[in-house]
Structure formats: structure tokens, C-alpha cells
Image (tube, rainbow, N blue to C red):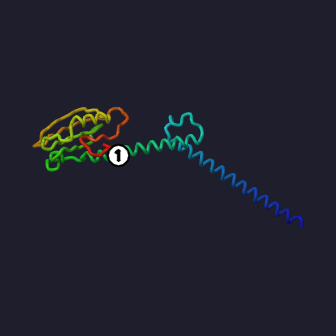
Amino acid sequence: MDTAPDNIKTRDISKENDRKIIRRDLERKRRQEMAASLDSLRSHLPPEMIKGKRSILDHVTVAVDYITCKQKNLKELSLKRDELKRLTLVGSGNIGSSSQCTRSCITVLPFLGGVSIVLNYGGLDEGDLQLSKVVELLLEEGLNIISYLSTKVGDNLLHTIYSEVLATKKRSPVKRIGRSKEPWA
């Protein structure tokens, strides 16, 4: 009769040991996955941001700050892109048509290492769009003007500016050329 309770105790101890082993293995696996995730996180952060930071909390905080900064930059670039889309007329072959550009319009075309910008003054009137403002904006945006051409086609005055990108510099937010009623421009 003594053997039955001993077998039960042995089985209970064996089950308890099995649970401990399983729990230990799961914890080891979880720690390995966390270490791999942290390594992956660190690999996506610029080294100068995590230099001198040793704790996991510091790395996560730096990652949050980095992501917030990138989201802010993305929003600024999206606003800039939307404003440039609104200000420019992208296309080719439409420049000489006075029916499409009765007022001032801009065409931006890709050019080797930069852009070609065509300002079309319909009816020879500069209106809200001044060449000096466009040149100022190009220089502020880090573009170097390499050549300029002015042509009269019918009643239209075309100014073509060829520019290339200078060495990287911090870009400023989009500035509206000409008059604007929007408070943010």
C-alpha cells in the first residue's frame, strides 16, 4: 500500500519538474526574442543617437524620439509636396499653348542632376509670379542655377531655368510665390 502513494508523489514531482522546465524554456525563448528585437531596433537607429546609452529603456526612448522626428519630417515633406503640386504644372509639350496658360504658370521637368523650370508669362504680364522670387526660392532650396534662357513665343514670354542640386543642406518649408490669402503661406 505504501507504493501507491509513493508513485503518486513521484508523478506529482515529475509533473512539477516538467512545468518548471517548460516555463524556463519559454522564458529563455522570450528573452532571446526580446534580445533579437532590440538588436533589430538598434540597427535601425543612427549610431550617434544611441552612443552612450546602455539600457533598453534608453534605446526605446531614443527610438520613439527618432520615429517622432521622422514623422514630423514626413509631414513637412508631404505639405511641401502638396504645395509644390498646387503651384506647378507638371507636363511637357503644353508650354507654348496660350490657351492653357493665359496667366502665369510654371512647368517643372526633370533634368540631369536637377530640374528644368519653365515660367510661362501669358500675355507678357508677370502678374503674381516674379522671376526674382523663383530664383530666390531655388537658392533657398539648395539648387544651383547653371543656365537661364528667355524666349518670346507669340504673346507668351518663357523663362527657362536649368538648375542642379548643391551639396545637401537643411531644406526650409515651402514658401508660396506671389500673393496669398492663406495665413500659413
Residue nearest the viewer, comparing 153 with 14: 153
Q: Residue at x 89, y 65 (%)?
A: 2
**88 horizontally vs 72: left or right:** left
Labels in figure, total:
1
**43 horizontally vs 133: left or right:** right
- Picture quadrant of residue 112: top left
Q: Give x and y (percent) for residue 24.
A: 69, 52
Q: Give x and y (percent) for residue 127.
A: 18, 41
Q: Residue at x 53, y 37 (%)?
A: 50
Q: Relative to residue 110, is residue 21 depicted above or below?
A: below
Quadrant (top left, top right, bottom left, bottom right) of the C terminus: top left
Residue nearest the viewer, comparing 63 with 185: 185
**163 horizontally vs 69: left or right:** left
Q: Relative to residue 132, is residue 86 depicted above or below?
A: below
Determine which residue is flagged by label 1. 79
Q: Give x and y (percent) for residue 143.
A: 30, 34
Q: Give x and y (percent) for residue 121.
A: 16, 42
Residue type pointed to by label 1: Leu
Neighbourhood count class around disc 1 (C-alpha, 10 Å): few under 14, some 14–19, many 20 upward: some
Quadrant (top left, top right, bottom left, bottom right) of the N terminus: bottom right
Q: Residue at x 51, y 36 (%)?
A: 49
Instruction: Point out the residue furthest to the right here.
Output: 1
Element type at mark 1: helix
Instruction: Point out the residue furthest to the left here.
Output: 154
- Picture quadrant of residue 151: top left
